[in-house]
Amino acid sequence: MRTKRTLTPQERRIFHPELKKCPHCGAPLELCGYWRWDKTVQTLEGVISAASRPSRCTNTDCQSKGNRYVSAAGATLSLPESTYGLDVVVRIGWLRERRHQSMAEIHEDLDAQGIQITERHVSNLWHNYLALMACAERMDRARLDEAVAQHGGLILAVDGLQPEGGEEQLWFVRELFTGLTLHAVWLPVVDEATLKRFLAPVAALGYPLLAVISDKETGLPEAVSATWPGVPHQYCQAHYLKNVADPLYTQDRHLKTQMAKEIRREARQTLSELFSP
């Protein structure tokens, strides 16, 4: 029997709501003193210790003061109650649907990428993928109607996942109050025209929107503004901070390399002086 490997998170990631003002009264939102969820998640990029902290309106007279707002980025990290990243689920779906691989072959693929998972659970995640895709076809209108009645509108998160470089992407629209997936489809090309067509079925549902949250990929801001004129489009802070940090990380890595070279050079010189006759 294979020895079970220990999951060691490479980073701690805290998700805060992207919205900073109440969509109803405009008052500032404040973070709640508890986690919405806190778990260790295996993703294709590594193991992450992640938690999501909700926020609430600071206006005690606000009609929606009981609402809790969550992070869109956190909601798209993994499915509820799951410790596997949504990117893992999407890769399983892609390998099964596009590459026609067996569960055993998919298990080998994930194992090669360091994902700790049994072949049986690969099958479970495959069914999660099917359920995720089916949600867009069998809409739970009752829950959406209830969310609109309670909150005055919906908040949408739009994102795309690419299971392998250079391949098509799985794009989906999720509603944050209910956690429902409203639309999901594979897109071979991502541009403004394609994204407009992708968003059209969601717009056709006719629900009022409070905000749209995304990573604002090229063409997406234009597609969102054309589809829902006047609706606030918030940049996903997790993507924003990652984009800001990337050049700093590159420079930091270069600096560490240079420092290591300098330290080794000085160490060699010192040792040479100490042991020279």
Image (spheres, helix red, strand yellow):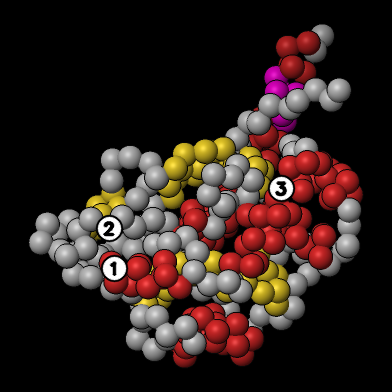
Instruction: Give me the C-alpha separation between circle 2 and circle 3.
Output: 33 Å
Tag 3 residue: 124
Question: What SS does tag 2 mark?
Answer: loop
Tag 2 residue: 67
- Mark 1 and mark 2 lie on one chain; the one further toward the N terminus is 2
Mark 3 crowd level (few <14, some 14–19, many ≥20, 10 Å Cα):
few
Query: Residue shown at 61%/74% (left/top)?
Result: 137
| Magenta: main secondary structure | helix
Residue type of the residue flagged with mark 2: Asn
Task: Establish if 164 lies above or below 125.
Answer: below
Q: Is residue 249 magenta?
A: no
Q: Are marks 1 and 2 in contact (CB under 8 Å)?
A: yes
- Front-most of 179 and 238? 179
Q: From the viewer's perspective, is 214 left or right of 252?
A: left
Which quarter of the picture shows residue 144?
bottom left
Query: Residue shown at 44%/42% (left/top)?
Result: 37
Dot in front, 2 or 3 = 3
Query: Residue shown at 47%/60% (left/top)?
Result: 179
Residue 178 position in % (x across, y down): 43, 62
